[in-house]
Amino acid sequence: MRAAEDGHVASMRVLLDRGADPEAKDKNRNTALIMASHNGHVEAMALLLDRGADLEAKNKDGSTALIWAARYGSVEAVALLLDRGADLEAKDNAGKAAMDWVKAEHLKALVLQILENAGRARERERARRAEALAAKQAELEEAQARCAEALAAKQAEMEGALAAKQAELDAQADAAQAYRTATVAAMAALEARVKQLEDLAQLL
């Protein structure tokens, strides 16, 4: 907690690596993220968020890290929290949201930062949608390729079966033709034999 409050990022990293809970709270229910945001320690805040710190955790006054960052004038801290998706409408126990605490001298810079963050958010969303579309297109193309491959394999199988059946029919036709030829030859031989017998009978 103290390391976050003082912005000692190296010490925080060691503690987190050793299993320190980024959600631990002090007697006022302040988390390390809230304490870091109070003093505008952006690098410490980023580390905590990367390690799973709750962006919307509240202390006993109902203040989130964003509310404290706005209340104590850290525009960079506000920008980071908004960039990570902090709720700008969250209210403390007094019913005040982050924008209600912003001092006049910080308002312009904060509004510009919010607009910039909104633009970045839109860009990220466009990039996400483009990536999702590309992934879907790749999935569709892969499915089409699998379908074409399966169709080609089935066609080859059918053509192979058809060729085998045709060969079988051709063999049967050849056998039938051979049988007919043999039958005609046998009949001719039989007729010749009968003729010989008839001729012999006339001589007798």
Image: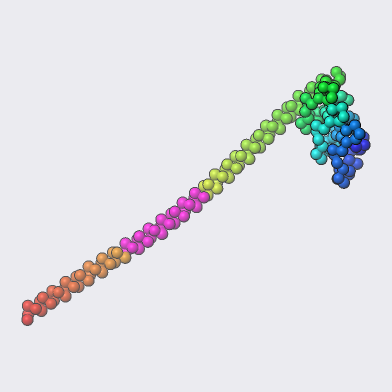
Please indicate whether residue 120 sits to the left or right of residue 107 in the image.
left
Residue 157, image x and y in percent?
46, 55
Residue drawn at x 18%, y 73% is: 190
Residue drawn at x 50%, y 52% is: 153
Query: 48 or 41, which lies in front?
Result: 48
Q: Give the main secondary structure of the magenta stretch.
A: helix
Residue drawn at x 28%, y 67% is: 179
Query: 65 or 154, which lies in front?
Result: 65
User: Dividing the picture into quarters, in which one does residue 95 lie?
Assistant: top right
Please, is residue 149 above or below residue 181 in the view?
above
Where does the C terminus fall, quadrant-wise? bottom left
Please indicate whether residue 110 sits to the left or right of residue 26 in the image.
left
Residue 34, image x and y in percent?
86, 32
Where does the N terminus fall, quadrant-wise? top right
Q: Is-magenta flag for residue 8?
A: no
Q: Is-magenta flag for residue 155?
A: yes
Query: 179 or 102, which lies in front?
Result: 102
Residue drawn at x 74%, y 29% is: 120
Task: Write the start and end of the magenta stretch as one range.
Answer: 150-174
Please, is residue 61 above or below residue 24 in the view?
above
In the rendered image, is residue 57 in sight? Answer: yes
In the rendered image, is residue 7 in sight? Answer: no
Query: 188 or 3, which lies in front?
Result: 3
User: Dividing the picture into quarters, in which one does residue 89 lie?
Assistant: top right
